[in-house]
Image: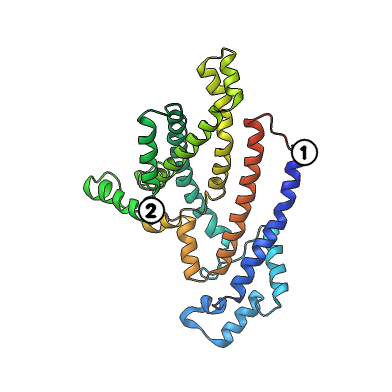
Amino acid sequence: MWVYIARRLLWLPVLLVATSLVTFTLLRFGPGDPAEVILGARYDEDAANQIRQQLGLDKPFGVQYATYMWGVVRGDLGESYRFRGRSVSELLFPKMWVSFQFNIAVMLASLLIGLPLGFYIAHRQGTWFDPTIVGIALFFSSIPIMITIPFILWGLCLKLSIVPCSGWGGLWDLRIITPVIALGVFGVAGLVRYMRASTLDVLGQDFIRTAKAKGLSAVMVDSRHVLKNALIPIVTLLSFSMAGIFFTSFIVERILGIPGVGNFTIDSIFNRDYPIIMAVGILGSSGFVIANLAADVTYAFIDPRIRYQ
């Protein structure tokens, strides 16, 4: 197991270099001049040339990329073009914490509702309850967030005045209810369907019939055999969710005015704040690799038959 983990971790620098190189190339040769972004309305050619020299933008592309990556290795993600004198880490990490808080709340709500419900309706296959819940799940999963958020705000904010209409007040503030419902409904619907399908697949296996033939109780069969094996495909799904837990709420943050990393990244793209965009790309790809590694390790704990060489 440890050898497998070490091999996977050795691929992390390779993937980061590939991701960062593509992003760095697109930003360097794309439209927009960092000197113009920094100077804004005070643009002057002489001042712009001085800024390009200070930032090393007058050097060859390979030198610029190597300098940037050496800074990343030392934990320096650069300095924002838009907010002069402030580092990318100083600006980005507090907003990542905001996004993490409400995304983890959404994920927990989806897991606590979706997994048990999907597991339950799989055992009720053939009754009216099964197609009814599946149909409701399909209906809610097909509604775009751009529609659910205004509807939630209309009901909870304008009509009932239960929650504030926008902003952010922390994990325990009432304003977290709107994003949790908006993203959680979609998450619950997806998890119900996946968990139901995975459970039905396990229930049809020979080892389940053998366990029942041995006289094990239904609770014992479900807890020891069905649930653990049904969770294996779900772990893959959750790994993708964990990989994007900081960076997947762009639309929700934008609409609700939540000061998270998604909203901040959109502003950075419009403002051509390239160091922020580079940092989001590197951190996002790192999270994806680590989350997939965590999923592979989790497989072995769920099912002892799985071993990695």
Nearer-the-camera pick, 25 or 270: 25
Rate crowding at label 2 as few (under 14), some (14 to 19) or many (20 or more) other CA atoms within 10 Å. Answer: few
Nearer-the-camera pick, 215 or 294: 215
Residue 283 is situated, as x and y percent measured from the top left of the image, at 60, 55
Q: At x 27% / y 49%, what residue is drawn?
A: 157
Residue 104 appears in the figure? yes
For label 2, the residue is 144
Q: At x 60% / y 79%, what residue is drawn?
A: 51
For label 1, the residue is 309
- Type of amino acid under label 2: Pro
Residue 14 is situated, as x and y percent measured from the top left of the image, at 72, 57
Quarter of the figure that contains the C terminus: top right
Q: At x 42% / y 27%, what residue is drawn?
A: 124
Residue 289 is situated, as x and y percent measured from the top left of the image, at 64, 50
- Type of amino acid under label 1: Gln
Rate crowding at label 1 as few (under 14), some (14 to 19) or many (20 or more) other CA atoms within 10 Å. Answer: few
Residue at the left extreme, as displayed: 159
Colouring of the image: rainbow
